[in-house]
Amino acid sequence: MNEDFRLLNSDSLSPSHPFWQFTTDTEIEFCLASKDPDGIATTGIVRTYTDSTAFVEMDSPKYTVTGGSDSWDPTQYLNLWVCHLNDGLGLLGYAAFPADLATDPDLDGVVISYTAFGYIGTATAPNDLGRTGTHEVGHWLNLRHIWGDDTCGDDFVADTEIAEAANYGCPTFPHNANSTCGSGVDGEMYMNYMDYVDDACMNMFTYDQGIRMQSALYGDRAGLLTSLGCSAPTGLLNEGSLENGFKIYPNPSNGSFTVDTHMLKYDDISISVYDLLGSKIQKFENIKSFPFKMDLNDLSNGIYYFKINSGNKTITQKVIIAK
Ligand code: ARG
Ligand code: ZN
Ligand code: CA
């Protein structure tokens, strides 16, 4: 997203292309949150186990009670859910517009299918270059589809050429020149992020699209301008951050575990080891530095629980010893 919004994408148009003059650095950038709404250190990523094999109900990923995960204050954060969407809809993603933030704060944000997110892992061709994120966040910053969602419709952006309808796949330039709705000799701007072409064939926002997105940032989304989401965390641990903040590896292990955290501030951390029947086997107290190595080689194979405690907060994680 930073590459695309800052015109650092390696596939941007070359100066000889007639549409090159419209390409723009929108000067909008994104960061993974370093501080959660409670002031606690975070990676900016909340991983949520769900029993839902697919989110069939629209917007169900946005609520913990429906198997998803409640959003963070949408005036301060861009909430972006990655999940398994309803296969039947064939939807890569969807977004909420800035004008709906005040009336439907819980629904604000962007949802993206795990098959169309980023460019590694589960991202699947032809949507494996992260452009669904670019497209949806374009909507989230008030951009409309280039064809105005209508035959020869209006996207309220002056420097995007009028388009008859959505374009798919990978058209060749010029596409639909001198169309019935009046596109010029250079045809439609199908390579715009707000069209529907394949990831590999979209590569630009226009100057006026950039202005429209910036206006959203000075208007309905102005809360982001003073958001502290990307500043240094200040608070102490809460349960949520405990859960996301500790890593135990390897797991399973032969009995030597390392516990690590990215937390910058914590108080009085202890780790108790319990067996499957709930008897406490061992306790490591007053842990001051991480990564912390734990030697449990004397224990026999099986399932154990680590209870990680900080102040009056506790989380429990399952570990397996297999020699
Ligand atoms: N909402 C659109 C869809 O689900 C996203 C299109 C994104 N296009 C892309 N090439 N990644 O179809
Ligand atoms: Zn769209
Ligand atoms: Ca236009």
Image (cartoon, rainbow, N blue to C red):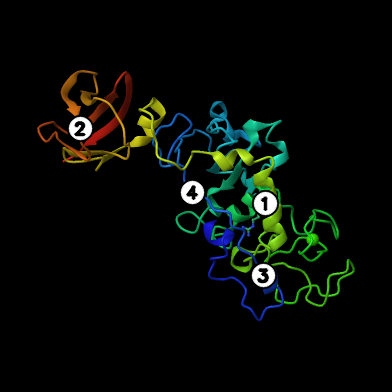
Instruction: Say left or right for 54 vs 292.
Output: right
Residue ID for mark 1? 213
> Whole-Å distance between the Cαs marked 4 and 3?
30 Å
Q: Amino acid at mark 2?
A: Lys
As drawn, the label of residue 288 is 2
Image spot of residue 13 (x, y percent): 62, 73
Q: Which residue is mark 3?
A: 170
Q: Earlier in the sequence, mark 3 or mark 1?
A: 3
Q: Is residue 105 above or below residue 279?
A: below
Report the image quarter containing ligand 3.
bottom right
Furthest toward the left, the residue is: 298
Between the residue at mark 1 and the residue at mark 2, the CA separation in whole angstroms equals: 45 Å
Q: Amino acid at mark 1?
A: Met
* Labels 2, 3: front one: 2
- Residue 31: assigned label: 4
Question: At 22% from the left edge and 40% from the top edge, which residue is drawn?
Answer: 291
Marker count (numbered):
4
Q: Position of residue 12 (x, y in %)?
A: 59, 70
Disc 1 C-beta below 8 A from ligand 2: no
